[in-house]
Image (spheres, rainbow, N blue to C red):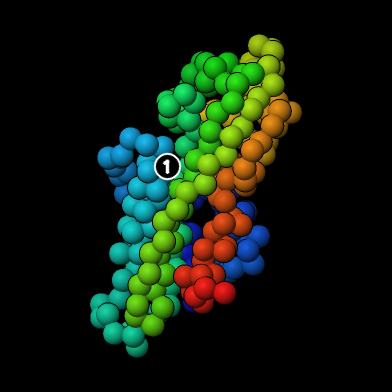
Amino acid sequence: MRYILASASPRRKELLKKTGISFETIPSSIEEKITKTVPSDIVMELAAQKAQAVFRALQPPSPDCGDAEDLTVIGADTIVVYRGEILGKPAHKSEAYDMLSMLSDRTHQVYTGVSLIVRKCGRTSVNTFYEKTDVTFYPVHKDDLRAYVESGDSLDKAGAYGIQGDFAIHVKEIRGDYNNVVGLPVGRLYQELQQLIYGPK
């Protein structure tokens, strides 16, 4: 079985390595299109778009079993949501500061959608799911916010923070899968993958 991670995220790569699966990375280059409005639906839609784009690019010229290698493509997308508003990657430091100020002393949600496309002996199966984790921050002093934003760590992350980095000192409580907040619910992914490839236990 050839495994492909349809993402360039270094955090997702590190998490997927924990499964012991040997995989390649082929990031999707499609322009993402959101047609959904519910956060869980949005992340599943985006994850599916990424996985399908990479899967289509790797399709063999013939659908015959002898020509089609066994293949699994993993797509994922993560968003941060507060009171129904999706918080993407901040465009600049002042936006990052505003986001973190809003999340200080409050609870927000992190959604990650995962789409698995498995082709085994010419037959293709698809499973798309999501995980949601509640994250609560302590009250964060303005000086701490400024110092974190100035470090530059917030600019490439949805919601303007990385839970595995320096901002971890401000996390009061997590309800749900920690790895989901990092970017990939790897435990759920592994279980779903086992069922797709080998069938129910």
Residue 170 is left or right of residue 111, and the answer is right
- Residue drawn at x 47%, y 24% is 83
- The one nearer the camera, 118 or 5, is 118
Residue 169: x and y, percent? 74, 28
Residue 166: x and y, percent? 70, 31
Whether residue 150 appears in this view of the structure is: no
Q: Which residue carries the number 1 mark?
A: 40
- Whether 92 is drawn above or below 110: the answer is above
Amino acid type for the residue under numbered disc 1 = Ser
Residue 88 is left or right of residue 61, and the answer is right
- Residue drawn at x 62%, y 54% is 14
Query: Residue 141 sits in which quadrant?
Result: top right
Residue 42: x and y, percent? 37, 41
Residue 7 is left or right of residue 122, and the answer is right
As drawn, the residue found furthest toward the front would be 201
Whether residue 71 appears in this view of the structure is: yes
- The one nearer the camera, 136 or 64, is 136
Residue 105: x and y, percent? 64, 18
- Residue drawn at x 65%, y 25% is 137
As drawn, the residue found furthest toward the right would be 169
- Whether 146 is drawn above or below 184: the answer is above
**Label 1 environment density (alpha carbons within 10 Å; few <14, some 14–19, many ≥20):** some
- Whether 159 is drawn above or below 187: the answer is above
- Whether 187 is drawn above or below 195: the answer is above
The quadrant of the rendering that contains the C terminus is bottom right
Give the SS element for disc 1. Answer: helix
- Residue drawn at x 52%, y 63% is 192
As drawn, the residue found furthest toward the bottom would be 66
As drawn, the residue found furthest toward the top would be 142
